[in-house]
Amino acid sequence: MKRIFTVLAFTGILISCNSSDKTKTATQESATTETEADSSSNDINPQLKPIDTDEALIATALMAAPKESRAQSKVIGYNMAGEFVTLREGDNEFIILADDPKKVGFSASSYHKDLEPFMARGRALRTEGKTEQEIFAMREAEMKSGQLEITPGSTLHVYYGAKTAYDPETSKVDGAQLRYVVYMPFATSKSTGLPEVPVAPNHPWIMDPGTHKAHIMISPLPEDSE
C-alpha cells in the first residue's frame, strides 16, 4: 500500500512540475512576443509627418541645395492649392524647384539660376501639352540656333525618394537621397572619357551624349548602404 501511495505522490509531483514548466514557458514566450512587438513599433519614427503645407514643401525642397546655400535660395513650384508660384524669394545663385504634391513620390531639385531659361522653357512647353519627345526636339533646335543656352558645367541637384513623409526637425524626407547632374551640351563619351552607361554603383557616366541635353550623371550610394 505504501508503494502505491508513493507512486501516486511522485506522479502528482511530476504533473505539477510539468504544468509549472508549461506556464513558465508560455509566460516567457508571451514576454518575448511583447518585446518583439515593442521593438518593431520602435522602428517607426513618430516624428515623421506628411508634406501637407506650403511651409513643409519649402523645408523639404531646401534639402536639395547645398547646406550653406539654403538660407538665401529662391524656392518655386506648385503650392498645396495646385498653383505654380514663387514659394519663397531668394538672392543667391540657386533656384530650388519644390516637390509637386500631386505626383507620386518625392522629387525636389536645385540648380544654378543661369539654367532657369532652359528649365522655364520646358515647363512652358509641358503646360502647352507637348510630349517629352517634342520638348526635347524643340529645345535642341533652340539650343542650336542660340535661342537657349546652357553653360557647360551647370549643375542640377536632385533630392528624391519613393516616400512623402518627412521629419519636421531635420526636414529630411524619409528614405530620400541625392543625385547630381552636370550639364555638358553636345559632349560625348569620346570627348569626356566617360562611359555611356554606369559601369559600377556610384560611378559617373554620360547621358544623352551628343545632344543639347548631354550631362554627367552622378548617383551617390544611399546612406544606409555605405
Image (spheres, rainbow, N blue to C red):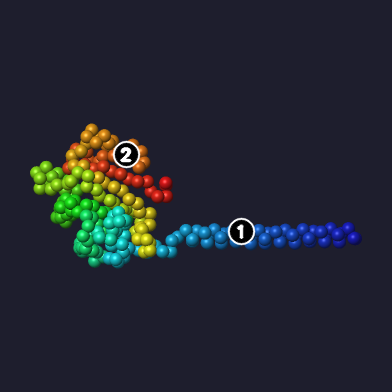
In the rendered image, which residue does mark 1 sit on?
Answer: 29
Q: Which mark is residue 198?
A: 2
The amino acid type found where label 2 is placed reads Pro
Question: Percent x, y for residue 126?
Answer: 17, 53
**Occupied quadrant, residue 169:** bottom left
Residue 75: give x, y in percent of width and height. Answer: 24, 60
In the picture, measured across the screen, residue 5 lies left or right of residue 63, that is right
Secondary structure beneath label 2: loop
Q: Nearer the viewer, residue 165 or 153?
A: 153
In the rendered image, is residue 106 in sight? Answer: no
Alpha-carbon distance for marks 2 and 1? 49 Å
Depth-wise, is mark 2 or mark 1 nearer the camera?
A: 2
Residue at (86, 61) in percent of width and height: 5
Say left or right for 174 vs 215.
right
Q: Residue at x 27, y 65 (%)?
A: 54
Q: Earlier in the sequence, mark 2 or mark 1?
A: 1
**What kind of residue is marked 1?**
Glu
Residue 81: x %, y % from top left: 24, 66
Q: Is residue 63 above or below residue 155?
A: below
Residue 215 disc label: none
Can residue 116 be seen from the camera position used here?
Answer: yes
Query: Dot 1: within a 10 Å radius of its alpha carbon, few (fewer than 14), some, or many (20 or more) residues?
Result: few
Q: Please name the residue shown 24% across and 36% down the image.
A: 192
Graded by Cα atoms within 10 Å as few (under 14), some (14 to 19) or many (20 or more), the crowding at tag 2 reads some
Residue at screen point 22% across, 34% down: 191
Q: Quadrant of residue 189?
A: top left
